[in-house]
Amino acid sequence: MIDFEDNFWNWSVQRYGQQGMKDAFLDAQDRFGMDINLALLFLYLDQHNKHLTGDTIKELYSLSHHWQSVHLAPLRQRRRSAQGTADYDDLKAQELRLEKQEQKALVAACKPCDGSGRLAAEYLKSLALPQTLQAKLLKLKSQD
């Protein structure tokens, strides 16, 4: 089981905040449709030598699609349209709350087992990310 509050969320915030990583994640999200939260989960699991069954991966993909299409993408579009307005900061805070809720939903559906996997590499490859972008994002899983 993944300890969401103390481990995964804080790990994600720290990794996302590393120099150059925010831009890499946003580039992959905007140009290739990557769900940053799902990518971070796969990186986290890979770093901790955890594996997922095919059924669990399908469930995570389904959850990701739901959260991105129903909740996050529409709000993200509204926030970006509101840049420079009084509503921007409130929309940004709402988006961050939803990102955290999506992570909680993904973690709740996650049933990791021991074993080394290549979850993140397979996910990034499925999005057809350029090799340089894949390599940059995959470096995160090897950092302590």
Image: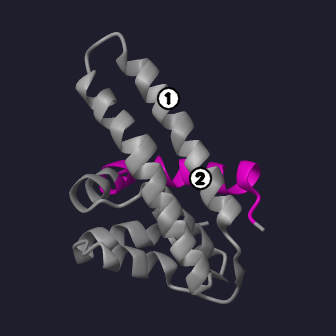
Residue corresponding to mark 1: 94
Residue 74, placed above or below residue 33: above
Residue 127, placed above or below residue 17: below
For mark 1, give the secondary structure: helix
* Mark positioned earlier in the residue sequence (1 or 2): 1
Give 109 or 117, whichever is nearer the viewer: 109
Residue 143, placed above or below residue 86: below
Measured as percent of width and height from the top left, residue 45 is found at 61, 73
Total count of labels: 2
Query: Is residue 62 rendered to the left or right of residue 4?
Result: left
Residue sticking out furthest to the bottom: 115
- Where, by quadrant of the figure, is residue 32 drawn? bottom left
Q: Amino acid at mark 1?
A: Gln
Q: Which circle marks residue 103 in the picture?
A: 2
Magenta: main secondary structure: helix
Residue at position x 38%, y 34% from top?
Answer: 75
Give 125 or 23, whichever is nearer the viewer: 125
For mark 2, give the secondary structure: helix
Query: Is residue 108 rendered to the left or right of residue 16?
Result: right
**Would residue 129 be counted in the magenta stretch?**
no
Residue at position x 56%, y 35% from top?
Answer: 97
Residue 114 appearing in the image: yes
- Which stretch is magenta? 2-25
Residue at position x 45%, y 42% from top?
Answer: 71
Image quarter where the C terminus lies is: bottom right
